[in-house]
Image (tube, rainbow, N blue to C red):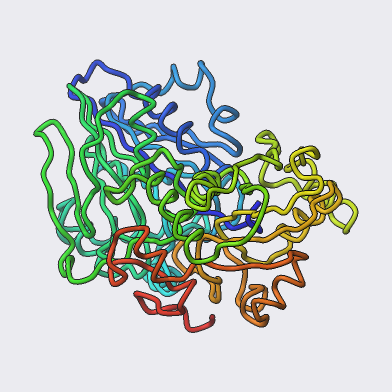
Amino acid sequence: MQDNLQDKCGIIGVYSRKKTDNVANFLYYGLYSLQHRGQESAGMSIFNNEKIETYTGMGLVVDVFNDETLKNLQGHIGIGHVRYSTTGESKEINCSPFAKNFSDGTISVAHNGDIINSKELKEELIKDGYKFNSTTDSEIICDLFIQEHKKCKDNIKAIQKIAQKLIGSYSLSILINDDLIVLRDPLGMKPLSIAYDGDYVMVASESVAFDTLNLEYDRSIKPGEILLINDKGFKSYFIPGSGKKEANCIFEYIYFARPDSIIYDKRVYDIRLAIGKALAKEHPIDADVVMPVPDSAIPAAIAYSRESKIGYGEGLIKNRYVGRTFIMPGQEKRETAVRLKMNTVEPEIKGKKIVLIDDSVVRGTTSKEIIKIMRQAGAKEVHLRIGCPPIISPCYYGIAMASKKELIAVNKTIPEIAKTIGVDSIEYLSLDALVEAIGTPKEKLCDGCLTENYPTKIPDDN
């Protein structure tokens, strides 16, 4: 509902010390828990004691896999992926994990993030004779590995070499025959955590995948850390040059991660409560009720209500069964689409002065439609409070965000934004307050979309 602002992917990896175990169900339920991170396709690769078997498909996890497919995916080591495309079209050939054979076996890659210099890397690989079947970053990473592995014949050394060529964000779960290798980029932009329980080791984009399977969260994989997991145990390596700088994605805290997750060793729900409390302190307003735009703004709205002593209410109800790709062109049909996704509870809204809490505003088009249906339900006043500063620049690291010219905050003042959306007032949380709510030093966060200060070189054509 936040104007099509979407994260790229969710990844998972599972290793069982018992070679007779089958991890397909672990991967399935873990991916189910990460479904919010990508709804276009799902897939998994499993080593079956002889070779890697990969199964992928378009749609939700429950659409792609069934009892029969899971029964046919046998093995004690595997990786999984749910996808939302930012680099590479939404087509079956781009489903992940992406697997390729090489001289010593098979490599399969599940990737969350975006490689900024993928175009240049792909052109170099094509010059060297590599042919591509997809338009994804994952295939580029596969081919870079194959290229480097020819030279050194060592999985970790090859990954360290290719990591030094990649510019951008990446958390990776990689299966190379019976080696499970996971890593984060040197800046640690995308989250990736690890859990242990008895014979199992599991890594995932968010801790909710562990909770579903009753595994105990251990820690976040460190920026630049490469973790090798196999029958010898697990061993930690690092990308050369890691540890100099950190840049956790600020929007993971604000919007993308599930509130019941732990990411970057921090509990998301607590941060969103802190955001709501800070909003109430920075931008108080005389009102009858505090309401969230569901679902990600609910914790912030609860905290705003507690801090302001204004009662909490739910006047907007989200239909969780309308897919992200639901498209209806034309103004009348767009309004119908919004009503399908979000409906009002009229008695909670009629005649009231409302503080409406949302996590972000991108283009403002969805916000405008929400305010319209609230006015139609009889809202006396609507005061919009946003849990982050204005978005003034695109993201280049794996978040599908509008181009700069489409961002409502780029060419409009705060009063102009309020008028365009149709609210009585709109206020944004300051960057300092947001950083304080997160509890991570500003220099360790990526806030490029809010400040235009990016932690890496950005594409020349943007």
Residue 253 position in % (x across, y down): 42, 54
Q: Is residue 1 above or below residue 239?
A: above
Decide if residue 334 is in sight here: no
Please say whether residue 90 is visible from this viewpoint.
Answer: yes
* Closer to the camera in the image, 162 or 211: 211
- What percent of the width, then of the height, locates residue 85? 55, 54
Residue occupying the point 88% across, 58% down: 330
Q: How many labels, in total?
A: 0
Image quarter (top left, top right, bottom left or bottom right) of the C terminus: bottom right
Q: Residue 231's spot in the image, x, y percent? A: 13, 31
Q: Quadrant of residue 200?
A: top left
| Residue 339 to residue 159: above or below | above
Choose between 125 and 410: the one closer to the eye: 410
Residue 121 at what x, y percent from top left? 39, 70
Quarter occupied by residue 353:
bottom right
Measuring 65% from the left and 81% from the top, which residue is drawn there? 413
Q: Nearer the viewer, residue 413 or 117?
A: 413
Q: Residue at x 44, y 27 (%)?
A: 28
Q: Is residue 158 left or right of residue 249?
A: left
Vertical comparison of 49 with 59: above or below: above
